[in-house]
Image: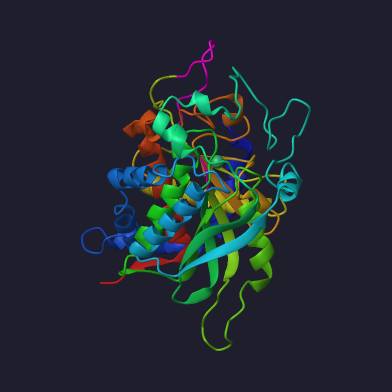
Amino acid sequence: MRVSSLIVTGLTLLTSFGTSAIAQSGRGASMSADSVPDPIKTAVARLDLERYKATVKGLTQFGDRRQGTKRNRDAVDWIEAQLKRYGCTNTGRITYEYRLDTAARGRGTGGGRAGPRTGPGSAQGGGTPRGIRARTGVNNDSLAQPDAKLRALNSEASVPGQRQEVYCTKVGTTHPDEMYIVGGHMDGIGWGEAANDDGSGTALVMELARVFSSPDIQTERSIRFVLWNNEETGTNGARAYIQQRQTLQGKEQPAGSGKYPEPKWLGMIQHDMMMFDHGMPHEDGTLNKEQRHEADVNIEFQVASKFAADAQKLAWALATANEKYATDYPASVGQHMTNTDSGPFQDVVPAISLRENERGVQIGNGWDPHWHQPTDVFATFTDKDFRLGLNAAQTTLAGVAMLTGLSIKK
Ligand SMILES: [Zn+2]
């Protein structure tokens, strides 16, 4: 209903996008009747709710992980150690300088963090807000956090200076020179634990790194898992990555080695706030207590971006993967991606984001009362919330597996 005009186009485009991967998995499925299991299904089954929750929980030990603090740097170290433990040993770091003037430039510029408004009443990213709107904002009051221990953990203030963010890479067997980038942002704000924004997306990316790094899993193309820093200040970490590495794409180094420090970017898939879809606020501003039965994973591309056509194909590829492999919740595709690390990529490469709700017209209308609030802590969320995040993980894992040609060694 949401994008009925796009559905026909989307499906048509999809037939030309990743056709071989889909046909392959189709063949796998028909052969698998009794003997050969579908390798994507096997890989998806290696995700589970308790592991996903444990990874979110692990991230919350560093409080809100605000950029420019020790708790943020400790979280980067912890993430890197976990990635190595998972077997994603090919790690690297991007080092950049964060100054307040770069922050000012980062916010709201075209093709950047905030997407265009298409009219006076439109939402960020360009959608039309409907229905009941509840208040949104960022909590900057430490005393609004009732948990004294967490308040103390979050007390160190951010200072400008050097920043780092970590990534690891699954190297492709036949096309090590091409990759998909799978990202989430590890920094947070609001005096909580940044459990949902964006512990939920960071944990998803880490869990995918774990599964894809299993010794028996091969992919034809490479995959880079990146945990961006400084998203909350204006996607500065993603911008630094593009600035430092865009021109290195596809270069073999050293020549003849078969090694590609920066494979060519085929697409960028971002994850930001994955767990809470309780519906529209009520008239009094309150929300349903439980995850709504109609909850879905929202896959967004930006219709006003340079790579809109290919970004749309990428979105539909993941939606198709969701239909086939996700266990509980469906996916919906929308055209107003905005305000996350995929924004800086959208005019460079096909870029999409996955979220609990559409960022512009839903989250922007107050559909997540914990957004940037002291209540964004692990204990706020129930298994039904975590399960939506797990379904997003299943969606991206299966989609990327199809696109990169996953197989499992016997
Ligand atoms: Zn976020």
The quarter of the picture where residue 384 lies is: top left
Q: Magenta span covers which residues?
A: 271-287
In the visual, does 309 lie left or right of 395? Answer: right
Q: As drawn, which residue projects farthest toward the top?
A: 284
Q: As drawn, which residue projects farthest toward the bottom?
A: 256
Residue 379 position in % (x across, y down): 36, 31
Residue depicted at x 46% and y 49%: 202
In the depicted structure, whether residue 70 falls above or below residue 156: below
Residue 317 position in % (x across, y down): 51, 52
In the depicted structure, whether residue 187 falls above or below residue 1: below
Out of 163 and 177, give the one closest to the viewer: 163
Is there any visible trace of residue 247 in the rendered image?
Answer: yes
Residue 285 within the magenta-colored segment of the rendering: yes
Out of 112 and 197, give the one closest to the viewer: 197
Residue depicted at x 29% and y 57%: 42
In the visual, does 288 lie left or right of 14? Answer: left
Residue 158 position in % (x across, y down): 59, 44
Residue 395 position in % (x across, y down): 43, 48
Out of 187 and 292, give the one closest to the viewer: 187
Out of 365 and 391, give the one closest to the viewer: 365
